[in-house]
Image (cartoon, rainbow, N blue to C red):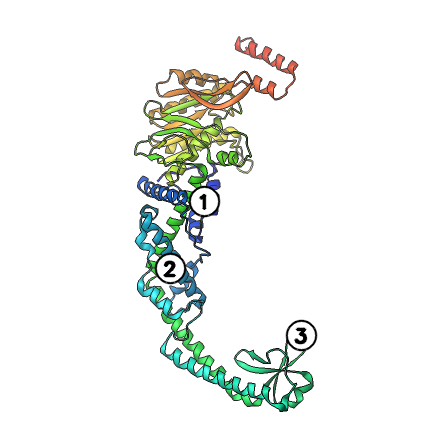
Amino acid sequence: MIHSDLNTLEFDGIRRILARLTLTPYGDEAARALAPAPDLAIARRMQLSVSAARHIVDAGNQPRLGTVPDVRAALRQAAQTGAALSVSALAHLRTLTHVAGKLSVLAASYPDVCPESGDLLAPQAFTETIDHIINEHGRLREDASTLHITLYRQFHAAESEVRVQLKAMIASPEYAGAFSNQEPIHWQGFRAVLLVKPSFSDRIKGVRRGTSSGGRDVLIEPVAVVMHNNRLEAINGQIEAQNQEVLRQTTDIVREHTPAIQKLIDAIAWTDLALAGGQFSAALNAIAPELVDTPTLALTQAYHPQLLLQFQQRQITHVVPLSLVLDDSQAMLVITGPNTGGKTVVLKTVGLLVTMAHCGLHLPAEGACIVGNFNRVIVDVGDKQSLHHHLSTFAGHVTVLRRLLEEADSHTLVLMDELGTGTDPEEGAALAMAVLDELATRKVRGIVTTHLSPLKLFASEHPYLHNASMRFDYTTLTPTYQIETGQAGSSLGLIIAEKNGLPATLLEQARHHLERIRQGQIFN
């Protein structure tokens, strides 16, 4: 499994985008927890699924699943012996099987979208049981059991008798004008009452049950129906007891099929995540990189996905693609160039794209890309100073270097920004050279950036290292954000300072001091 510095690479941004594109709570959770696959074989399987999903998106065949319930709490409850799931929980389980059925139909046309598509089919005994006891409205059926049929027959007969007697009272001339103009028969639980006008309440024998909303009418249970109401409540008590028995029996069946239901959930999560990956691929016009077993990297006009999205949303005016190769003939790049020239973006782009590829995702690129089998990506970007941990900037970098020397091997990708900075330039350069020597001995692949001039010469003479630079447009005095291999660059600090408005007199004095430094006339 590739271990990548996900926080440094801001991988959470990719997770959040994918989570927003999912259709189910299971896919949402999978997206938020997305990490590089345990091995390249699984990464390839997910990539196949994302590629199939991309075809689905391009064809306009995305499934419409509606609201998908999360049944995992119900499954945990069902695991307890004697538990009885609620009717709504069982209805949610049936909804889940319907969702899985829709995805199963989709997988029949696009088999790669779910490698275990058979898991999307719920056990027949389970679905038949749920369908037998839950009606289309998500309620327990009146014929859920033989006893249910008997009890409901009795209940409806008693209810009908109550209605007959109450309607006879309503129609009787003796009580003309006594009842509310609205429907006079009202139910309190399973007890039938009449809505009686206050002026007539003393003329009807019965039990006062309060007033209607607003207090305009009195609720009276006539003596003539008290016995029938008692019977309705008694029968309903029996129905509720039978309901619990049926729910317990059905929960036993859920418990029996929980492993299959969990597989179904896993298949939904995989498919949903793949579909989100397909949508993300379409939004970026991305491609599937070739995943190879050797520690190799080749990017052809590839983009940082977040920058590309910002460009599409017109938050930035342009984005420059990145092309580079790391292989046996060019294993370690030492990039130099101006501040704000894009060196750090190169590191983050490479690290993020390699990580995405190991997650099975497509890469935003205009040409073919190859991503090798790296077992870890070690990233050192940004200021490591920490007041909380009493770390200086240099001490923070040393902490990363110590980890690097403990973990790096020939299948490690190292991405280090400003190697050797944060201390005396000569000592920093010497330490950087020693680190690069050690990485070369271990055949580590990677990219380091620096402003230290001695490292440029060191890289040009080292058989394992290769200079690279960020191009600069001297006509407009602006960086082009394009990388050029085989040639070291200049920091151009004074030029950048001039473009950003520092006084000309101060810059002239700085150039005078720089010349003296280069001639050895100062600090000697």
Q: Secondary structure at mark 2?
A: helix
How far apart marks 1 and 2 lie (CA) works out to 24 Å
User: Residue 68 sits in which quadrant?
Assistant: bottom left
- Residue 243: image location, x then y, percent: 42, 74
Q: Amino acid at mark 2?
A: Thr
Q: Is residue 191 above or below residue 519?
A: below
Label pair 2/3, CB-CB below 8 angstroms: no
Q: Which circle marks residue 18 in the picture?
A: 1
Pick the residue in front: 52 or 290. Answer: 52
Q: Is residue 302 above or below residue 522?
A: below
- Residue 505: image location, x then y, percent: 65, 14
Residue plotted at (39% across, 34% down): 354
- Residue 360: image location, x then y, percent: 37, 40
Q: Amino acid at mark 1?
A: Leu
Pick the residue in front: 249 or 49. Answer: 49
Is the N terminus in the top left, top right, bottom left or bottom right quadrant? top left
- Residue 60: image location, x then y, percent: 41, 46
Residue 438, visible in the rendered structure: no
Q: Is disc 1 surrounded by few (<14), some (14 to 19) or many (20+) residues within 10 Å?
A: many
Report whether 274 appears left or right of 221: left
Q: Amino acid at mark 3?
A: Gly
User: Residue 59 sits in which quadrant?
Assistant: top left
Residue at which label 2 appears? 97
Disc with the residue nearer the chain's start (1 vs 2): 1
How far apart marks 1 and 3 lie (CA) works out to 52 Å
Disc with the residue nearer the chain's start (1 vs 3): 1
Is the C terminus in the top left, top right, bottom left or bottom right quadrant? top right
Q: Secondary structure at mark 3?
A: loop
Of badges 1 and 3, the one in the foreground is: 3
Residue at which label 3 appears? 214
Q: Secondary structure at mark 1?
A: helix
